Every structure is written in C-alpha cells, then in structure tokens.
Image (cartoon, rainbow, N blue to C red):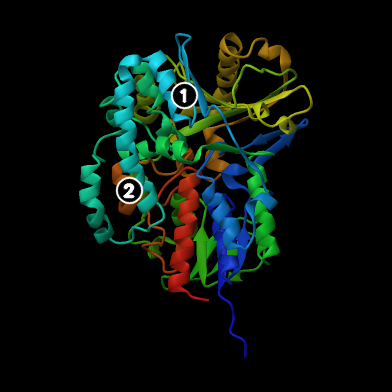
C-alpha cells in the first residue's frame, strides 16, 4: 500500500506563502494554497483599471537570487518565467530645499556624488560602508535564513551583536560616520521600507544598503505581479492546488496539534501542517482558540509594537513625466519630528514624506501608450491613531496631489486619467492586518530574531509562519528567507 504524502495547507499567497508552497510541493508534499482574495499576491496584489497596471505593494526587488532559488528548487530556470532588469539609479532622494541625491551600485559614482554633495563626509562614508558590510555578513548572510527557536540561539550570537553595536539605532549608526544632516537621511531611511523608524530600529538594518550594493535594485518586467504569476505557474505545474476566494475560518486542532483547516465556505481540509503567510497576530487571534494559546495570548499580542501603516495613492496620467525616476523618495523638511508623529504620537501631520514609484520609467507596458503609471506611498500612523479614514482619505489625497503638482508633476490634476486609494483601514480589513500595520511587528531589537514570533509556532505543533511577522522580518528578502526556514523546519519535523 502506497504511503500517503504529507498534506500541507498554506494560508495566504503573498511572496512568503507562494515561495513556501513551491518549495514544499517540489519536495514531494501535497500543498493546498488558500487565498482569501480573488487573485494571488497578498501585499503584491495587482490592480488593473482603465488600461493601467498597479502593483499593490512591494516594488523594490533586492537580492534577486532569493527568487531564482525558488525556481531552481522546482527544477526550473527563472528566466523562462520572468525577467528582472536592474534599476539605475536605485533611488533619487528629493529634499525640501530643492537639492537632491541619487545613488546606484557603482561605488566610484556614488563616492563622486558624495564628494559633490558633502565632501567632508566622503571618508566617513567609506568607513560606514566597511562597518555595514560586517553587519551584512552577520545579519543577512549568516542569520537571515536560520531559525531562532531557542533562547540559546540568541545567546550564541550575542557577542557578535554586541561587537556590531546592534544596540544602536540605524540613525545612530549612520550618525557616527556622516555629519551632513541631509546625507544622514539618505543612508538612514531604509528601515521605513520594512516598517521601522530609523531612530528606533536596531542598527542591524543598516545592512539593507549593503544588500542593495551587493546585488542591485531590480524590477520585474510586467510589474511585481509578474513574479507572482510566475511562481503560481510553477506551483501548479508541480501539481499544487490553488483555492481563491477562500478565507480560512479556523485552524483545526486535536489538543495543541494541527489536524486541518476549515475554510469559511466549503469542506474542512485535513492536513499534517499549516504554514500561515497571513498576518501573525490575526492568525493567532482569529484562527487559534484562546485556550490553545499560552504564549501568544490576546494580552501579549495587544502589548506588542506594530509598524506604521501606509496611505497608497495609485494614479495614472494622460501624459508622461520623463524627468521622474523609477524610484523617488520625497522627504519633508521635518525628519525625526515627522517620524515621531507617525510612530510615537500616532497623529496625521500637516506635512508628509513619500515614496513615488513610476514603473513606466522602465516598463511602458504598465500604462497605455503615451501615459504614465504611478503610486505614491506615504507612511502614516497605524489604526491605534483613531483616524477616521472614511472621512480623511479624500482630503489627504487632495494634499498629496497638490504637493506633487506644485513640486514634481506639473499640471497633474489636468492629466489624471485614473486613480484609487488604499488606506490603513484597507490594511486592517482587506489585508486583515492587525491594527492596520503595513509591515506587522515593528522591527525593534526587542521584536527581532528570537524575540520575534518564531517560524515554528510556540503554541501549536506543526503551525509554521512565513512572511513579515516572523523571523527575519519584512521586505522581500526577509519574507523569502522566512519561506526557506519554514521549508527546512517542515522537512525536518515531518519528512515526506
């Protein structure tokens, strides 16, 4: 009699869920991928309207080898499914006073630009890069795809973390080497890409700049959704099952062990393991009964710190703005004070900073001919703020349009062809993110590595996590690394 294959349910089809599903299916598990929405992607959901294609979330692709590894695990070649192209410059940073700074992976060119912008900081920059490489070697190369399941795992690396001054913040780390206040912003904004405040996030996240330098910043032709489609195609080629519009009602347990999942509609699905790529806090709060949770009680989850949220304004224009780069960071005059408003005071300020994404700078297929496609992503407080976005979304959108029209996109109002908004309320409801956080738990030291919810649940046997809320954290490289960890743990504990 043939031995039954191990059955695994993956809840949520963001990058973490898709990567885990492909990896496990390729290993011989029978995987069912359950997605609450009508299309795959999670944060990388794609919106199409009026001939424009809008990537819902992640648009900065670093460490592309982590994507390539998924295809290789399935016996495929990435280039047969999706094409990644480098973006140059990585970013253009626009300051309030009209100055700007651009950088890419060319070390000599970046140093030349620093020499022109703040020559007194050139030697400090070189010293910072040397130290950041040490942090990168330990924090990413050695630790990103290693689980922290026991406190002893943390103790083993404690001397290294102390040596690397992980007790400092990213801002404090950069400030040791860079003196120009605007250049400090250039090299400290990166934690915002993973939900962290540069003035509170551990300096381990200074590795992001080195990550960019090491492998570049890339774009998937057709948009980030093209990566989602490629991974979905491989998964189904391997025999994986996809169920769309299938929210999960509960994870079924016997005692404290997973035995299945119960969709909100349809029959129960018996499984040997569950991987949740859904929001970690809401996985525990909504899918696991209180009596089965000893560590992640509602009280514990309520007491954790959640990242800021995001207001995303998607818009298409009936003309092209050729002077706008693919990735532009527009910084307010206030920096630390604005971040305090967002993270600490949780109030909506009169000013704001934003990330402006223009994929049509690289890929004209994202908009009708002669048109441009954009999104403006603005960090805002999470839902603990009490802001009523049903009332504030319109006025806030108007402020964004005014600012862009005055400083970056002339006659924007006249040339708007289509638009949509996504608010913290949508993060809380559509994406089922607890407190509307954009990146799950805030990446402070006390919520990193062993202190972050583990990749294998501490409360429920054979419940695993992949995604922003578990180790190593948010961002595409972190999420893809968490999928590698989930795969390894399942293969060790539930071999096929």
174 or 468: nearer the viewer = 174
Position of residue 393 measured from the top left corner of the image (x, y, whole percent):
57, 25
User: In this view of the protein, can residue 330 be seen by the observer?
Assistant: yes
Q: Name the residue rendered at 52%, 29% in the picture.
A: 90
219 to 4, vertically: above or below:
above
The residue positioned 51% from the left and 32% from the top of the image is 310
Q: Quadrant of the N terminus?
A: bottom right
Q: Residues within 10 Å of mark 1 (few under 14, many from 20)?
A: few
Labels 1 and 2: the sequence-earlier one? 1
Where does the image place residue 347, in percent across and percent down from the top left? 41, 24
**Secondary element at tag 1:** helix
- Residue at image point 35% right, 31% down: 198
- Name the residue carrying label 2: 138
Residue 201 in view of the camera = no
44 up-or-down from 182: above or below: below
> Which residue reaches farthest front?
108
Report the residue marked by disc 1: 109
- Residue 77: image tag: none
Question: How many labels sit on residues?
Answer: 2
Which residue reaches farthest bottom? 1
Q: Position of residue 394 (x, y in %)?
A: 60, 21
In the image, 176: left or right of 110?
left
Judged from the image, the secondary structure of the residue bearing numbered disc 2 is helix
């Amino acid at each position: 009699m043939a031995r039954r294959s191990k059955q695994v349910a993956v809840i949520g089809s963001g990058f973490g869920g898709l990567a885990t599903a492909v990896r496990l299916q390729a290993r011989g598990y029978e995987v069912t991928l359950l997605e609450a929405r009508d299309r795959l992607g999670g944060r990388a959901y794609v919106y199409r309207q009026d001939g424009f294609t809008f990537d819902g979330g992640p648009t900065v692709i670093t460490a592309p080898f982590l994507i390539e590894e998924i295809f290789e695990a399935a016996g495929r070649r990435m280039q047969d499914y999706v094409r990644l192209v480098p973006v140059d410059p990585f970013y253009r940073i626009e300051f309030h006073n009209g100055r700007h700074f651009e950088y890419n992976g060319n070390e000599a060119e970046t140093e030349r630009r620093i020499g022109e912008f703040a020559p007194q900081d050139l030697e400090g920059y070189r010293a910072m890069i040397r130290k950041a490489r040490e942090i990168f070697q330990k924090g990413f190369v050695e630790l990103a795809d290693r689980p922290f399941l026991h406190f002893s795992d943390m103790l083993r690396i404690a001397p290294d973390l102390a040596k690397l001054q992980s007790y400092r913040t990213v801002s404090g780390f950069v400030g040791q080497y860079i003196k120009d206040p605007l250049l400090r912003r250039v090299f400290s904004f990166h934690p915002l890409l993973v939900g962290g405040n540069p003035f509170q996030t551990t300096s381990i996240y200074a590795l992001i700049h080195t990550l960019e330098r090491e492998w570049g910043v890339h774009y998937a032709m057709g948009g980030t959704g093209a990566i989602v489609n490629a991974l979905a195609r491989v998964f189904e080629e391997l025999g994986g099952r996809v169920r769309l519009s299938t929210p999960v009602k509960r994870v079924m347990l016997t005692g404290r062990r997973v035995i299945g999942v119960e969709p909100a509609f349809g029959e129960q699905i018996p499984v040997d393991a569950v991987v949740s790529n859904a929001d970690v806090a809401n996985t525990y709060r909504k899918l696991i009964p209180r009596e089965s949770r000893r560590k992640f009680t509602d009280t514990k989850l309520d007491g954790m710190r959640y990242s800021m949220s995001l207001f995303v304004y998607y818009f298409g224009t009936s003309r092209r703005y050729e002077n706008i780069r693919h990735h532009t960071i527009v910084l307010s005059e206030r920096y630390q004070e604005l971040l305090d408003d967002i993270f600490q005071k949780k109030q909506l300020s009169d000013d704001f900073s934003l990330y402006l994404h223009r994929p049509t700078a690289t890929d004209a297929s994202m908009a009708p001919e002669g048109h441009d496609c954009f999104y403006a992503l603005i960090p805002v407080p999470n839902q603990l703020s009490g802001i009523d976005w049903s009332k504030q979304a319109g006025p806030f959108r108007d402020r964004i349009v005014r600012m862009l029209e005055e400083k970056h996109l002339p006659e924007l109002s006249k040339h708007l062809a289509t638009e949509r908004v996504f608010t913290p309320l949508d993060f809380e409801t559509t994406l089922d993110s607890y407190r509307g956080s954009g990146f799950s738990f805030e990446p402070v030291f006390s919520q990193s590595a062993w202190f972050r919810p583990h990749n294998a649940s501490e409360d429920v046997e054979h419940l695993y996590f992949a995604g922003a809320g578990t180790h190593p954290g948010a961002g595409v490289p972190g999420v893809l690394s968490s999928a590698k960890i989930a795969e390894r743990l399942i293969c060790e504990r539930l071999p096929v």
